[in-house]
């Protein structure tokens, strides 16, 4: 799918949302204007187990300017509690669980209404998100009515076979995300999208994608936004920048992750701001 097509697929009624809509209006609380920073993690705050130097100070500067910070990640391997701990221990910023939102929660939200028996190909983040919504889980392809797929570091032929069989039997196929790679301390590594692609090829069915830039996670983000402008901060054009474009939010691209230069931004996904690192962001954006 082209990047233009990706934005179109990610956009529901976004064409009717004005650039200065509900989430972009200026609000004054006392003398302090408010806004939102929707911040990615991998490649922005840290790379694997290595912090992006100065990221924690930048986040605190953004808060002092009046921004509320929300961390939104397509990584579905960890629970929100574990992710908050990682932001604190590696990133140096004391994040609360209320500030964390991931693609696992977005996938679970899709299944929350009917709670089908669900097969999981992925990490504990998906299991926890499903459990929190009382969605039953199964390893039996004949009884699974949904299959949720994310990054699975123990992915095997056996899991591929079971997931594809369940989907061919009629189970709903939900991908937490389709990021083919992700940035880590040792370089670029295969992501959930590589596993999703294998299951799609084996089953002949395309998944419904829950994470950035798609509608399920955008709905959850909008439920947590405060009044004021919204800035999406990320390192990956096809997820972070596409999500901002879909909702008519502002976008800032950092060059510490997947994208390493302006040349990595496809036409149609140009951000409002490009910075070398999140360290440079507070001086470039305001809540107004």
Image (tube, rainbow, N blue to C red):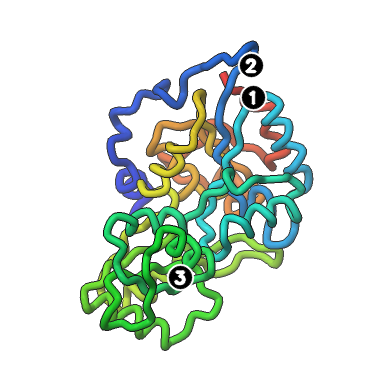
Give the percent coordinates (x, y) of residue 38. Answer: 55, 39
Pointer 1: residues within 10 angstroms few (<14), some, or many (20+)?
many
Give the percent coordinates (x, y) of residue 192. Answer: 48, 67
Going from the N terminus, do you reach mark 3 or mark 1 first? 1
For the residues labelled 3 and 1, the Cα–Cα distance comes to: 39 Å
Check the image and name the residue furthest to the bottom: 158
Going from the N terminus, do you reach mark 2 or mark 1 first? 2
Q: Disc 3 or disc 1, which is closer to the eye?
A: 1
Could you say which is closer to the camera, residue 239 or residue 259?
239
Mark 2 and mark 1 residues within 8 Å of each other at the beta carbon: yes
Dot label at residue 32: 2
Could you say which is closer to the camera, residue 145 or residue 50?
145
Pointer 3: residues within 10 angstroms few (<14), some, or many (20+)?
some
For the residues labelled 2 and 3, the Cα–Cα distance comes to: 45 Å
Residue underneath mark 1: 66
Give the percent coordinates (x, y) of residue 72. Answer: 54, 47
Residue underneath mark 3: 194
């Amino acid at each position: 799918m082209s990047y233009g097509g990706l934005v179109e697929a990610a956009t529901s009624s976004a064409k009717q949302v004005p650039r200065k809509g509900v989430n972009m209006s200026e609000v004054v609380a006392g003398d302090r204007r408010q806004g939102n920073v929707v911040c990615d993690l991998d490649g922005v705050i840290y790379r694997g187990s290595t912090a992006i130097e100065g990221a924690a100070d930048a986040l605190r500067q953004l808060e002092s300017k009046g921004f509320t910070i929300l961390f939104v990640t397509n990584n579905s391997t960890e629970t929100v509690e574990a992710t908050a701990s990682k932001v604190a221990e590696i990133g140096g910023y004391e994040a609360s669980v209320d500030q964390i939102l991931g693609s696992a929660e977005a996938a679970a939200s899709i299944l929350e209404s009917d709670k089908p028996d669900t097969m999981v190909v992925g990490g504990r983040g998906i299991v926890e998100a499903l459990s929190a919504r009382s969605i039953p889980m199964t390893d039996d392809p004949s009884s699974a009515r949904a299959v949720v797929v994310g990054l699975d570091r123990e992915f095997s032929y056996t899991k591929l076979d079971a997931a594809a069989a369940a989907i061919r039997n009629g189970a709903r196929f939900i991908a937490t995300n389709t990021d083919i790679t992700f940035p880590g301390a040792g370089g670029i590594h295969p992501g959930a999208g590589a596993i999703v692609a294998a299951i799609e090829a084996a089953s002949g069915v395309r998944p419904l994608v829950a994470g950035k830039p798609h509608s399920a996670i955008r709905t959850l983000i909008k439920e947590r936004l405060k009044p004021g402008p919204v800035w999406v901060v990320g390192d990956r054009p096809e997820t972070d920048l596409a999500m901002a474009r879909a909702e008519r939010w502002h976008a800032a691209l950092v060059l510490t992750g997947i994208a390493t230069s302006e040349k990595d931004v496809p036409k149609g996904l140009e951000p409002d701001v490009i910075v070398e690192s999140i360290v440079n962001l507070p001086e470039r954006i305001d809540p107004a």
